[in-house]
């Protein structure tokens, strides 16, 4: 008779690991959000959980097979995965948030105010920055650093251990503050230049009231703002590296490591 040599504890351990990994993958860029379809995210979680299972079972010191304990542990692993995914999502979404701020400040989001049907096309810079961040995470190998940091949470917070609500809330608050600061660092210089340009145009209309500022803004200024955004794009890579390290530190903070 053919035997696979897989014990019940290993199967249950794999499912518990997948509960944490799956919740984390569902939220964390570039796997979570709109980057991958739901089915692909589930398959990705199943694949990532496979190599993490042996070390996770070893770190747990044994898994209880009682039905009630399994249900509680499954719910706890999902909660841990969501907490870890939220801090990564908060930090790594700073680049997309900066693009959204530039959209509003630069006037690219005004299209939805005139035509609600163009709402999906309004957030031009936000979409570009989100796509760019996802590509950079994959190309630069930053996702490997994030995954390595996540895999260590099974040692710092093994299966069977409880999640500290205080540490989680504190880490999420710090991640939110750091994300806000990173958004200002990315979008701040562009916003400042756009403000100076708008003030200059306001003074120009005072000097020469016959100038059609509306036509001038939609023709030349839009091109200049896009060029300004393109000049700022190379600065995203070092910022993303810092956000990647911050994500690993945040996951370590939630795990208590």
Image: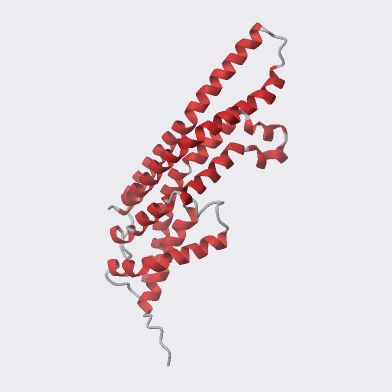
- Judge from the rendering whether residue 210 lies leftward or rightward of residue 123; answer left or right: right
The structure residue drawn at horizontal position 49% and vertical position 56%, both measured from the top left corner, is 26
The structure residue drawn at horizontal position 55% and vertical position 45%, both measured from the top left corner, is 131
Q: Residue furthest top?
A: 207
- Judge from the rendering whether residue 70 lies leftward or rightward of residue 102; answer left or right: left
Q: Which of the two residues, 198 or 237, is positioned nearer the viewer here?
A: 237
Question: Vertically, is 30 above or below 201?
Answer: below
Q: How is the image coloured?
A: secondary structure
Residue 169: % across, % down: 36, 46
Q: Which of the two residues, 224 or 30, is positioned nearer the viewer here?
A: 224
Question: Vertically, is 253 above or below 210?
Answer: below
Question: Vertically, is 60 above or below 98?
Answer: below
The structure residue drawn at horizontal position 36% and vertical position 80%, both measured from the top left corner, is 7
Residue 21: % across, % down: 43, 61
- Res 136 seen here: yes
Question: Which image quarter is the N terminus in?
Answer: bottom left
Residue 177: % across, % down: 40, 37
Q: Residue furthest bottom?
A: 1
The structure residue drawn at horizontal position 44% and vertical position 48%, both measured from the top left corner, is 140
Task: Give the mark count.
Answer: 0
- Judge from the rendering whether residue 212 lies leftward or rightward of residue 171; answer left or right: right
Residue 248: % across, % down: 36, 49
- Res 71 seen here: no
């Amino acid at each position: 008779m053919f035997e696979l040599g897989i014990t019940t504890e290993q199967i249950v351990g794999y499912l518990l690991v997948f509960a944490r990994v799956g919740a984390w993958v569902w939220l964390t860029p570039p796997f979570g959000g709109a980057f991958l379809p739901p089915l692909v995210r589930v398959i990705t979680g199943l694949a990532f959980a496979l190599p993490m299972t042996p070390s996770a079972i070893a770190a747990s010191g044994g898994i209880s097979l009682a039905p009630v304990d399994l249900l509680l542990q499954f719910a706890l692993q999902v909660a841990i995965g969501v907490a870890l995914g939220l801090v990564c999502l908060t930090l790594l979404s700073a680049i997309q948030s900066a693009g959204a701020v530039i959209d509003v400040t630069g006037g690219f989001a005004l299209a939805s105010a005139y035509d609600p049907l163009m709402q999906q096309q309004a957030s031009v810079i936000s979409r570009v920055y989100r796509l760019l961040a996802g590509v950079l995470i994959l190309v630069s190998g930053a996702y490997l650093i994030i995954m390595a940091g996540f895999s260590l949470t099974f040692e710092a917070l093994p299966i069977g251990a409880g999640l500290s609500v205080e540490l989680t809330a504190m880490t999420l608050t710090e991640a939110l503050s750091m994300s806000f600061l990173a958004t200002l660092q990315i979008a701040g210089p562009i916003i400042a230049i756009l403000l100076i340009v708008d003030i200059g145009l306001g003074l120009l209309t005072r000097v020469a009231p016959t100038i059609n500022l509306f036509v001038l803004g939609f023709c030349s200024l839009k091109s200049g703002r896009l060029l300004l955004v393109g000049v700022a794009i190379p600065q995203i890579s070092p910022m993303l590296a810092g956000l990647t390290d911050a994500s690993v530190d945040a996951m370590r903070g939630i795990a208590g490591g």
